[in-house]
């Protein structure tokens, strides 16, 4: 019986030599090949992205003692706008009043100096926009987000080529 098992592979080889069909060889599937070659590449890219995000993408410099430390970014500068008080249209044609106190966040004092001469234009753009709002436009966090995004867009148009990073709400009251 052991000889029969030994002859089985030879019988297949003889059958293939006589023109018979040999059993098909196992082929690696495309998925297995992709995993074999693609997975290490994806892991390496993921590790690089994780390291970059973990370090915050900051450049590392060496101090006098040879120790590495991250360069500190200069703190932002804030430009306060005067309080704004505008009428809003409420449901049923009633009137409501919006009191808004905001600050502009800019990268540095140089950018803040460029904004001061055009401050009347910034206030005018804000006033015109705010007067067109309805109370419903400001409801919920989505309304606040849309208001912030629109104010950032409008202030950047007014102060170009200077750039405002963000509009920060210091106070917002609707009565």
Image: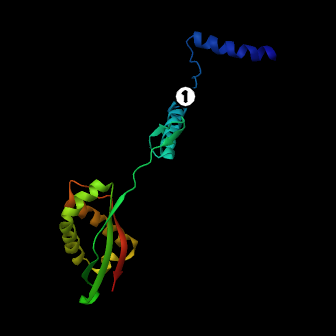
Q: The N terminus appears in which quarter of the rendering?
A: top right
Which of the two residues, 19 or 61, is positioned nearer the viewer here? 61
Up/down of 16 relative to 77, above or below: above
The structure's colour scheme is rainbow
Is disc 1 placed on a helix, strand or loop?
A: loop
Res 31 visible = no
Which of the two residues, 92 or 101, is positioned nearer the viewer here? 101
Q: How many marks?
A: 1
The quadrant where residue 109 appears: bottom left
Residue occupying the far front of the picture: 64
Up/down of 91 relative to 48, above or below: below
Up/down of 133 relative to 24, above or below: below
Local crowd at mark 1 within 10 Å, few (<14), some, or many (≥20)? few
Percent position of residue 66, x then y: 53, 34
Q: Identify the residue at horizontal 22%, vertical 72% (top origin).
A: 129
Up/down of 36 relative to 113, above or below: above
Q: Is residue 33 left or right of residue 106?
A: right
Q: Identify the residue at horizontal 40%, vertical 72% (top origin).
A: 141
Q: The C terminus appears in which quarter of the rendering?
A: bottom left
Percent position of residue 161, x then y: 21, 53
Q: Which residue in the protein does label 1 denote? A: 28
Which of the two residues, 86 or 147, is positioned nearer the viewer here? 86
Percent position of residue 99, x then y: 31, 80
Res 83 visible = yes
């Amino acid at each position: 019986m052991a000889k029969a098992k030994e002859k089985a592979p030879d019988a297949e080889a003889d059958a293939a030599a006589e023109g018979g069909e040999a059993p098909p060889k196992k082929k690696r599937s495309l998925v297995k090949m992709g995993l074999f070659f693609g997975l290490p590449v994806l892991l390496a890219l993921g590790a690089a992205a994780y390291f970059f995000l973990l370090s915050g993408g900051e450049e590392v410099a060496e101090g006098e003692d040879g120790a590495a430390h991250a360069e500190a970014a200069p703190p932002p500068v804030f430009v306060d706008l005067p309080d704004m008080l505008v009428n809003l249209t409420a449901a049923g044609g009633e009137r409501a009043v919006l009191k808004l106190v905001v600050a502009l966040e800019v990268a540095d004092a140089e950018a803040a100096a460029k904004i001061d001469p055009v401050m009347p234009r910034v206030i005018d753009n804000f006033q015109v926009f705010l007067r067109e709002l309805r109370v419903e436009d400001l409801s919920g966090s989505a309304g606040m987000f849309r208001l912030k995004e629109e104010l950032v867009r409008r202030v950047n148009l007014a102060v170009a080529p200077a750039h405002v990073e963000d509009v920060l709400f210091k106070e917002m009251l609707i009565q």
